[in-house]
Amino acid sequence: MQHHQPHLSAAGTSTPGGPTIALPSTSSEYKRGKKRGSYNCGRCGLPKKGHSCHTSTIATTPTDSSADISAPSSLSVTRPPPSRQGYSHLRRALSFDDVDNCGDFYTPEPEEDDFDVTVDEQESDPDSGGLPGSCLWEVLRRLPPAGLLSAAKVCKGWRETARRLWRAAEVLKLRVPIRAQVGFVGSVLHKCPGLVSLSLRMESDVDATMLACIAFSCPNLEFMEISTSDTALNRITGDELGRFVADRRMLKSLKMEGCSNLGGFVLCSSSLSTLWLSDLCSLSKMVFNCPNLKEISLEFSRQENDSTDLITMAEGLGRGCPRLQNIHIASLRLTHAVVLALSAAQLRGLRMLSLVLGSEITDASVAAIASSYPNLELLDLSGSSISDSGIGMICNVFPETLSRLLVALCPNITSSGIQFATAQLPLLELMDCGMTICDPDSLNPTSEETSGCEVQKTTNAKMHLIHQKLIIKHSRLKKLSLWGCSGLDALYLNCPGLNDLNLNSCNNLHPERLLLQCPSLESVHASNCQELLIGAIESQVKNNPAPVENLLMSKRFADGSKRVRVPHFLTAQSCGDDKKRRKVEKRQCKVLLY
């Protein structure tokens, strides 16, 4: 849930669609407002002694201010563990959860609005309206930042408690609107000197001044993310980013998007363990000297004129980052030579490898990966040119380790290769085959200038891609994505553990040739499908039997030494009574149309 937060500045605090509420910029202004030492009533002016004021409080309407800026933010006083959640446009490089029907991987992260912390008992404060300090703390810590700023103006006790909450905060998520300046971010960060994790959603331009403000205000920062909107421009250069990383001795995670102006960089850090950079373009140099780096995600812009030397970068990863475990690279310039360079890097701890959009990655590249890294748990070769032969090599090398396989946008893979993978990989839990089994007419329409001979040759070569049948039987598969498989006309699934199925844009799938034996299904994505197919899906997911527990009673021997199952003929009546008492709730499956 998003809340519009006021902008804290010396001029005042504004709320969206409302007036600007003036805030004192110094503590002396608070003292003058209290009028300490006065013997007269602040409402009617009569002496306080023996006086009972009946004058109603008049709400003053403050004047408008030019600093009308709202900033949704969230604050947390507990340090979060490094989670596997997506960050705005920054794709979680090695996650299946961000796959959608367009081939784009992006899931926005929901913002948290409450303080989440367990604190020690606070001393009671007579200025807190009679509430015990611990109760006031528990109330205020559940407020969003906007509410906390407003609560600080109630009285001295509330202001002090709010100040302690701000100082105790370790996590801050802040949206910086278009008209905001660096001073806005600085005024908020100044309240939170103990920040450990900072997430900025920039709707205004960001440059080195922002990095300097963060470095000055957050000396203990360990996790930092900067995401940009479509209207924002990231002006940070490679030298400025390198100096920031080198000076942050405690920085463990850096995630930044919109890095189109880096030009080149040298990153040296002994503490950095996670690095995500997106929108990279034409880098002159990429030097990594991060001995403790475990995860790296580099996404390049999809421009044909990108001149980045990925071979040199891959060779440098082996020298400067020997502890890498997860690698994600998305670039149109990924080739077989880049794969050979990564194979020669000898990253012995590598467990997850994602090389996306490399159309020149072939079955030979799969052989190089299999020979160098036999312990992979995740392999993502989406957008490559591998075929069923490459799938066979993957199955021969990784049968005991591979649990996630993503081969979307691989037109040379057929339903036979997919069936072979699910049959030979017993640990497989998720598989993405989007746009693999496709109707060639929808992908490569033949122009009028093409000769009849070429049309006949293309039709004969790709006739096997039309009207394919897919049969999958797997006990551990949990997520299966077949989005865009327009060449698929029959689907039979027998997967007891499957809970998520993506059938978006499966236009040619016949309703009478669909069989779903998946009792654990929770969601089926079926956008851009025929209405008859949607009806068949809804009918089958409703009729799927839910997994029922074994209701046979268990008894022990007289000495209590061994537990045995009681046969049906001995416990027919008791089992019947037990079924009446224990109702098995069937899990509802949702068919998503969007």
Image (cartoon, rainbow, N blue to C red):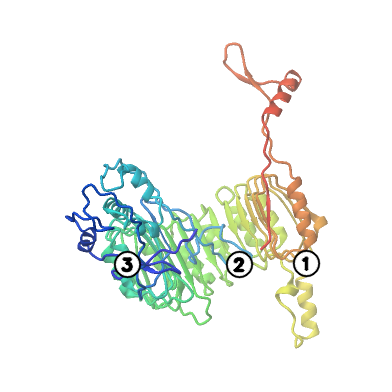
Camera-near label (2 vs 1) is 2
Circle nearer the N terminus (2, 3): 3
Residue 5's disc number = none
Q: Which residue is rendered at x = 80% and y = 57% of the image?
A: 511
Using residue 117 as the reference point, say whether residue 508 is left or right of it: right
Q: How many marks?
A: 3
Answer with the quarter of the image where residue 294 lies.
bottom left
Residue 466's disc number = 1
Residue flagged by tag 1: what amino acid is it?
Ile
Circle nearer the N terminus (3, 1): 3
Query: Callout 3 environment at 10 Å: few (<14), some (14 to 19), or many (20+)?
Result: some
Query: Looking at the image, can residue 75 be seen?
Result: yes
Q: Nearer the viewer, residue 339 or 131?
A: 131
Determine the secondary structure under disc 3: loop
Q: Which residue is rendered at x = 60% and y = 65% of the image?
A: 363
Q: Are marks 2 and 3 in contact (CB under 8 Å)?
A: no
Q: Which residue is mark 2?
A: 103
Q: Are marks 3 and 1 in contact (CB under 8 Å)?
A: no
Q: Which residue is mark 3?
A: 22
Camera-near label (2 vs 3) is 3
x then y, percent, for residue 437: 71, 64
Answer with the quarter of the image where residue 126 lies.
top left
Q: Mark 3 and mark 1: span between their CA atoms?
A: 68 Å
Q: Which residue is rendered at x = 32% and y = 67% of the image?
A: 22
User: If the image is split into quadrants, where does the C terminus sit?
Assistant: bottom right
Query: Callout 2 environment at 10 Å: few (<14), some (14 to 19), or many (20+)?
Result: some
Q: Nearer the viewer, residue 172 or 522?
A: 172
Determine the secondary structure under disc 1: loop
Using residue 169 as the reference point, say whether residue 310 is left or right of it: right
Q: Nearer the viewer, residue 140 or 238?
A: 140
Residue flagged by tag 2: what amino acid is it?
Gly
Q: Mark 2 and mark 1: span between their CA atoms?
A: 21 Å
